[in-house]
Each structure stands twice: as structure tokens, then as C-alpha cells.
Image (tube, rainbow, N blue to C red):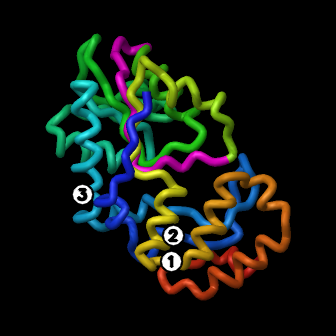
Amino acid sequence: MTSYTFNQRVADVLLFKGYFIAGHLYSPRVGYFPVYPESRRVFSITSKLKLVAEELSKTIVPPNADLVASREAAGIPFGVATALEAQKGFLYLRKEPKQYIASRIIEGVFLPGQRVVIVDDAVSRTHDKKTAIDQLTAAGLQVVGVSVLLDAAYGVTDAEQAWLRQSSEYQFATLVRWDDLMRYAAEKKFISAALADIVVAWIADPFRWSEDAENWQRFKAVAAREPNVVFDPSFKEI
């Protein structure tokens, strides 16, 4: 079950110079893409992190969670901040167990049967969320939801993500969707409508968009005039 209402409060917080990175950026899944929303930069501005955590904590109320869990690495600051805001315990999920002291994936204190919401910075393919759910479930915990700051799904089919987005078993909550955020940024004149249209078109069909050289040249011309976008060195490659 998906819970989504565009969170304007969070969107306003994300409209700061440095959040949108432009370039000839690479993803092993879809190849090259033009703009990346860098949520990791929210960590460094504690007032912004606190506000995001306040809104994420509200998504934990409906599933009545006992614990918040995040998988390393980018989700950890959001998970800890959300757990503090919601006054819930926190679990740290390693990608690989340590090879000394104690060899375990889940770090923290918990009891079998406790209800857990996974908190992360973003969701795209959902594969990492499935891994986290499997790890928590294997430890005897009950995963009841997944909450993220940004829904950054691109280049995936509905069928691939139906297990989460259309599930009656988990509540999936997101504060903002990437395409909605681009449109809102243009509405607030933080970026141009032309850049928003380009990114939304890429999100809708990244494979086809990236194959057209004219799309890249138009993007370069538009992005170069954006005062609130920062440029990856790869921008020069376009």
C-alpha cells in the first residue's frame, strides 16, 4: 500500500544550491543521465535534516512501529534522525557482517516480533529494500513499512516494484517524488521550466532519452544557464 501526498514543506527544504547536480552522470543500470538529486548533502545542514526527520517520523505512526531500521550507508543519518524524532529504537543494517568481535548484519537491541519501519534517503529499484526486509524478517522481526525521503524510481516497470508499491503487507511512504520535485522547483523559479521538462522526460524514459544526442545538447545549453545547479566535472564531456 503506497502512501503519498506531495510534501511541500520538505520540497522547500530541498531547494538549495547543491541539491541538484548536473553532468554526464553514470548509472550501471540505465547508463548516462543528466541530473541527480543529491540527498546526502542534506546531512550537513542539520536544520534541514531535522525537518525531513519530522516528516518521516509522521509516516511511522500508521503502521505503529516499535523500531526504525536503515541499511548502510546513505540511509543511516535519515534513519537515526527519524528514530530520535519519533522516539523509537534504531537498528543499523550492515551490507556485510564484520569479520571480528561479532559477525552479524543487524546492529542494535530488539526483541523477536517487534514491528519495524525501514527508513532510507531514496528508493529507485527497491532491490535493496527487499534485502533489508529479508534480513530483518530472518531475525524474527516484523517489517510493516518502508519510508523514504525521495521516490527516485526510473527505468523500472511497475511489475518489478509491485511487491512493495502495491503490497497489502507493507506501507510504502514517500515524501516527494522526483518528477514532482522538478516541477515544483520550476514553479518556485528555483530552476527553469525548460530544465524541469528535460529531467521529467528523462525520468519517464531514460533509455530512449539518453540515446538521442540532441537531448544532451539541449540539456547542456539549458543547464549551463542554471544558477542553482552545481556541475559535476563530467558536464564538460557533453
Look at label 2 and name its amino acid.
Phe
**Any mark on residue 230, and which?**
none
Q: Nearer the viewer, residue 127 or 98?
A: 127
Is residue 61 positioned above or below 52 on the image? Answer: above
Q: Is residue 47 left or right of residue 77?
A: left
| Circle 3 SS class | helix
**Residue 72: x, y in percent?**
44, 42
From the top left corner, tell me how far across and down residue 190 is, in percent: 44, 78
For image coordinates 44% across by 46% down, the residue present is 73
Please indicate whether residue 208 sits to the left or right of residue 236 in the image: right
Contact between labelled residues 2 and 3, with CB atoms less than 8 Å apart: no
Residue neighbourhood size for the residue with mark 2, other residues' Cα within 10 Å, grouped as few (<14), some (14–19), many (≥20): many
The residue sitting at 64% across, 55% down in the picture is 203
Quick check: marks 1 and 2 in contact, CB under 8 Å? yes
Residue 150 shown in magenta: yes
Q: Secondary structure at mark 2?
A: strand
Q: Amino acid at mark 1?
A: Ile
Q: CA distance from mark 3 to mark 2?
A: 19 Å
Q: Residue at x 78, y 61 (%)?
A: 210
Residue 68 occupies quadrant: top left
Q: Residues within 10 Å of mark 3 (few under 14, many from 20)?
A: some
Quadrant of the image for the N terminus? top left
How packed is label 1: few (under 14 Cα within 10 Å), some, or many (20 or more)?
many
Q: Check if residue 98 falls in the magenta segment.
A: no
Q: Quadrant of the C terminus?
A: bottom right
- Determine whether the residue tagged by mark 1 lies in a helix, strand or loop: loop
List the residue tagged with mark 2: 20
Question: Which residues are the magenta region?
Answer: 138-154
Question: Who is closer to the viewer here, 102 or 203?
Answer: 203
Give the residue number, with chain letter if any, for mark 3.
Answer: 51
Q: Of callouts 3 and 2, which one flags the residue occurring earlier in the amino acid sequence? A: 2
Residue hosting label 1 = 191
